[in-house]
Image (cartoon, helix red, strand yellow):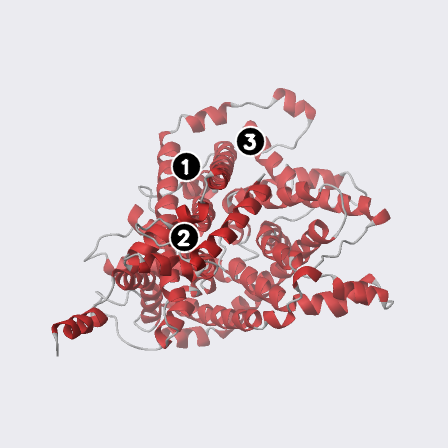
Amino acid sequence: MSTAGRTTEVGRTRPTGMKIATVIAGAVIFLLLAIPLAVQVITAFRGPFLPFGVSTAKWSADNFVTLWELREDFWAVLGSTAVFVGGSTIISLLLAFGLAWVTVRTDVPFRRVISVLVVVPFIIPPIVKAQAYQLMLSPESGVLNQLLRLLPGDLVIDPYSFATMTVVQSLTNVTFPFLMIVPILTSMDGSLEESARVSGASWGQTLRRVTLPMLWPGLLGVAVLTGILGLGSLEIPLLFGQEAGKNIFALKLWNLISAGAGELPQYGLAAAWGCVFLVITTIAFVIYLRATRSAERRASISGKGFRPTIMKLGAWKVPVLVAVFVFVLLTAILPMFALLWSAITPYPIAFSFEALASQTQWGAFGEVLADPEFWASLGRTLLIAGASATIACVAATVLAYGIARGRRTGWSKGMDLFASSSVAIPAVIAGFAMFLTFLVINPVIPLAGTIVALVIAYSYRVSIAYRSGYSATLQIRKELEEAALVSGASPLEGFRRVVVPLLLPTVFAVWIQMFILGTNEFTLPAFLATPESRPLSVYMYAMISPRSAQLYQPDQGAAMALIFTLLVFAIGYGLQWAVSLRAIGRARRRLTIPGLGTRAIAAVPNDPPAPATRAVAAQGLEEQRELVSVAE
């Protein structure tokens, strides 16, 4: 064989830098997801305590046998969790669909304002919302119960009943399905609905026979993801459900590992519970995949003929606005007022103007701002949220590009599914699995209870970044990368200098979303944090929980919750505003630079201005004009 032939053969077998980067990114995601779940499964089959390092650990199915022997408890937990998660999911979907329909498909006034008001609760940390609802529903001093007493019948809501807990859970989760339903309704063509109306069908018949069948795959996927989100939530069960909700899965898992005095934590039994519910959520995730796989058969957008239908409400505008106001009152105004009232009063008292004049004080805010632990836990929160969002976005973006541009093999399909699967892992299971993992490896790698452990745990939501990066990569034409390769750039250099700048807007948007989720996170650090590593959400819970003994300061806890919410709101919207300004500035600069197409494609030196490249550049120029108009 000639020297040239041997060189070619070596070039074919030697892995490129892009392949190595893809493998590393895949390994990071595999470590984030597979190892903790594997440790949980092993723990379920290796005795009542840790699976390794304990002399009594042995392979057996004793934990699952115990589950079956306690079948009354098993079925009680399964039934209570199904009612709690199912009920809250149904209520959340109904509210979200109604709000999305009003803002997208009707002529109700102030639609943009309504959209903003519905999204604002997403910024409020879940533990803050849970605390606000607990204060708002207090039997004696709760502002909502005070308002209800003004009505005939002396109606009072029991904040600790199972029904109340389910409704509160649904109100805290409305924003998530709302954000997913809005684009589904926006992209649905209204011509079929108009045809049904012309044929004599009423709005109700059109909704039941035309609209819902078209939206069914998307709505089913939203329902599954909302249910998984509710299943993994610990805040509402922990604050409201110590008695009525003791059989809810998240609280059951928490109680099994939070042993009281003289008791040992039942890690093996808790792992068995986690395996059972992990199977359930996996089945639900498969249903979601099958539902969304057939969504294209119900697509209704057809090019220039596409037109959304706007329903004229007429006399119904006022009742719809009143209903929206009641929703905003229950989800934003009253909870925030309840927090403020608790922060400025020394003890729980009912609101009155007399109490406002004589009992209020603002010292709790000063005490919070002077508390060094507040600033330390806030700094840890920002560090953990920022580092975890960065790890997830970098690994997911590299892997998404490698899989989207690579050959469709069994490995790539499997990795694509695996990287998308973290949405099927409830936060309470992920937190417990990470907790077991760090306990097992602690003798070798002492990470348990550290900030590094929290950063790793927060990164498990990598599928959010992966799916966004995968979709964004598919929207980038391959001609750009081919031009870089023709110019002599390696695949890794083409990715770094051509593709990454085009992906940055999507990556930044996802990073901001994951950063906000990280700052709001409570379930994961509830399992993993120690007093030396706890973020602000856990420290705040210690301030509002009577079980915290010397840390219990409800007025300071409420003040801290308000300060925390304002900080998250300012940081989240500040980052979004900065990214928007940057995108508008870049678009304007490109519009004013002659020969935009050649300069944009020439990120790699010596790029030849091929005809295909000029065509792509012309299309990119038009897209930039549209970007500026939309952004402005």
The residue at 67%/43% (across/down) is 112
Helix, strand or loop at mark 3: loop
Residue 379 can be seen, yes or no: yes
Say whether disc 2 or disc 3 marks the residue closer to the N-terminus.
3
The amino acid beneath tag 1 is: Leu
Helix, strand or loop at mark 2: helix
Residue 260 lies, in percent from the top left, at: 38, 54
Say whether disc 1 or disc 2 marks the residue closer to the N-terminus.
2
Q: Residues at badges 1 and 2 in contact (C-beta under 8 Å)?
A: no
The amino acid beneath tag 3 is: Tyr
Q: CA distance from mark 3 to mark 1?
A: 15 Å
Q: Quadrant of residue 202?
A: bottom right
405 left or right, relative to 142? left
Q: Nearer the viewer, mark 2 or mark 3?
A: 2
Q: Nearer the viewer, mark 1 or mark 2?
A: 2
Q: Is residue 472 above or below residue 545?
A: below
143 left or right, relative to 513? right
The amino acid beneath tag 2 is: Leu
Neighbourhood count class around disc 2 (C-alpha, 10 Å): few under 14, some 14–19, many 20 upward:
many
Neighbourhood count class around disc 1 (C-alpha, 10 Å): few under 14, some 14–19, many 20 upward:
some
Residue wearing tag 2: 524
479 left or right, relative to 226? left
Helix, strand or loop at mark 1: helix
Residue wearing tag 1: 551
Quarter of the figure with the N terminus: bottom left
Say whether disc 3 or disc 1 marks the residue closer to the N-terminus.
3
411 left or right, relative to 547? left
Residue wearing tag 3: 347
Q: Quadrant of residue 141?
A: top right
Nearer to me, 208 or 12? 12
Q: CA distance from mark 2 to mark 3?
A: 31 Å
